[in-house]
Image: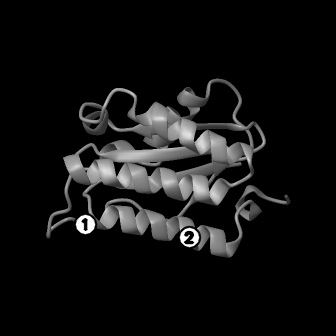
Amino acid sequence: MASIQDFFSDNDKKEIKKAILNAEMDTSGEIRVHLETTCKGEVLDRASYLFKKLGMENTQLSNGVLFYIAVKSQKFAIIGDKAINATVPENFWVDIKENMRVKFKKGDFVPALVEGIETTGKQLKRHFPHHLDDINELTDEISFGD
């Protein structure tokens, strides 16, 4: 892999973006995916840092979600903003991560991400339904580090 941006094919990127767009059609929540090659240190610390760096804590309703993956380090995290974490069931992120982990181990990265995004979107719809005046506050494009 020459660059982390080459980890997903163009079709893979389109499929992931489509999952984000579909999930966000039913919710005011904002979902992002960020990939890096490596994660030195604690994965939740890195994901929290990127959450802030990507401006995800600046959504109007504090309802952003970041799917962070460090490919070579084989680490990933899902971070939800404070309003989400206050409303979703206790093991919500753990359950999504475990379902994704099973698929990741098989190399099914795109299906794992799509399913995780869809599940997140359904939960966000319940607590943060889409309103007519909702605007897309964050890009739906996958972002890349190193």
The residue sitting at 20% across, 62% down in the picture is 130
Q: Quadrant of residue 121?
A: bottom left
Q: Position of residue 105 (x, y in %)?
A: 73, 43
Q: Is residue 1 left or right of residue 80?
A: right
**Which residue is at a point 14% across and 70% down the rendered structure image?**
132
**Circle 2: residue type:** Glu
- Where's residue 111, x and y in %? 60, 58
Q: Secondary structure at mark 1?
A: loop
Q: Residue furthest left?
A: 132
Question: What residue lies at 63% left-to-right and 40% top-to-bottom?
Answer: 101
Front-most of 95 and 35? Answer: 95
Give the residue type that dot 1 points to.
Answer: Ile
Q: Does residue 139 appear left or right of residue 81 in this picture?
A: right
Image coordinates of residue 19 in percent, x first then y, are 46, 65
Q: Which residue is mark 1?
A: 135
Which sits in the foreground, 102 or 139?
102
Question: Closer to the N terminus: mark 1 or mark 2?
Answer: 2
In the rendered image of this protein, does residue 91 appear above or below residue 14? above
Q: Residue furthest right?
A: 2
In this rendering, which labeled residue sits more in front, label 1 or label 2?
Answer: 2
Query: Crowding at label 1, few (<14), some or many (≥20) Cα neighbours within 10 Å?
Result: few
What percent of the width, then of the height, locates residue 16? 54, 64
Pointer 2 residue: 15
